[in-house]
Image (cartoon, grey):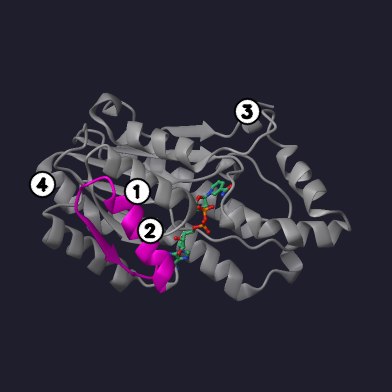
Amino acid sequence: MTLKGKSAVVTGSTSGIGLAIACALAEAGANVIVNGLGSEADNAEAIRKVAAHGTRVAFDGADMLRHNQIAEMIAKGERDLGSVDIVVNNAGIQHVSPIEAFPIEKWDAIIAINLSSSFHTIRAALPGMKKRNWGRIINVCSAHSLVASPFKSAYVAAKHGLAGMTKAVALEVAETGITVNAVSPGFVWTPLVEKQIPDLAKSQGISEEAAKKQVLASQPTGRFVSVEEVGALAAFLAGEGARSITGANYSIDGGWVAR
Ligand code: NAD
């Protein structure tokens, strides 16, 4: 129970990687605010899974497109759980398209959700962390924060931006007890990736199985990263043993960016 007494906000934690991170933090003893735009049933199921670890769990449906709602969610964490000690910026969306056909509203939404929402959570949570001289900010980036793929201009721009902001904020707060790090998964089997497979298969005229193999070709291990593995990395970075790790961008990508 290394995180006993700490409270965390995990954005986009009703599904996939965020849910696994919320579970890993709760398993380590943290209270958690679950957030996301899932259906009511999905949200209830996510809350049930996180609460199964026995810590306090609350839900906040803040939309990462709305900075007021983000600030209110952090204030709610401070009020209802007593503090926000850990912020995991995980909410994210994807859209794949050649840039000249890229819908402008998709570009704006990806930059807002995958990048700007982290600015808003950090901006709102830092004063409380500074007062308590303890904090952990974990930004869920991607292998696409380090390398690019075609047709993912907005996603690659947002993730490179988030990796840069991670370093800038880490330096700003280096002399406090607050660390700021990024985790950069390769392909993790979640709804976000699952949704890309039929499109890829269709666009290439191949089967979905062949499309999966094509996706995995960038990962030397030849297998998807699991959500639990990303959860374990986040829980490690949130712990006391990681207090000298800051401004880092941890790859968890089966060797993708080692090529
Ligand atoms: P997912 O689609 O399973 O989950 C996304 C979560 O974000 C959901 O809880 C959803 O409700 C929430 N969300 C989306 N828009 C939101 C909004 N406007 N406001 C609040 N919540 C919102 O996706 P995932 O694969 O678990 O991805 C999570 C993060 O991990 C993303 O930032 C993604 O870029 C990153 N990532 C994923 C992979 C992968 O292979 N799956 C790889 C690298 C990085």
Q: Are marks 1 and 2 in contact (CB under 8 Å)?
A: yes
* Along the line of sight, the residue nearer the viewer: 198 or 106: 198
Residue 238 appears left or right of 227 = left
Residue appearing at x 84%, y 54% in the figure: 207
Closer to viewer: mark 2 or mark 3: 2
Q: Name the disc covering residue 22, or none.
A: 1
- Tell me if the residue at label 2 has its CB under 8 Å from ligand 1: yes
Per the rendered image, the range of residues in magenta is: 40-65
Q: Residues within 10 Å of mark 1 (few under 14, many from 20)?
A: many
Spatial CA span between label 1 and label 2: 9 Å
Image location of residue 136, percent across then percent down: 27, 41
Q: What's under tag 4, amino acid-wise?
A: Lys
Residue appearing at x 73%, y 44% in the figure: 215
Image location of residue 7, percent across then percent down: 20, 48
The number of numbered badges drawn on the structure is 4
Residue 173 appears left or right of 143 = left
Residue appearing at x 60%, y 51% in the figure: 156
Q: Name the disc covering residue 46, or none.
A: 2
Closer to viewer: mark 2 or mark 4: 2
Image location of residue 6, percent across then percent down: 18, 43
Label 3 sits on residue: 255
**Quarter of the image containing the N terminus?**
top left
Q: Are marks 3 and 4 in contact (CB under 8 Å)?
A: no
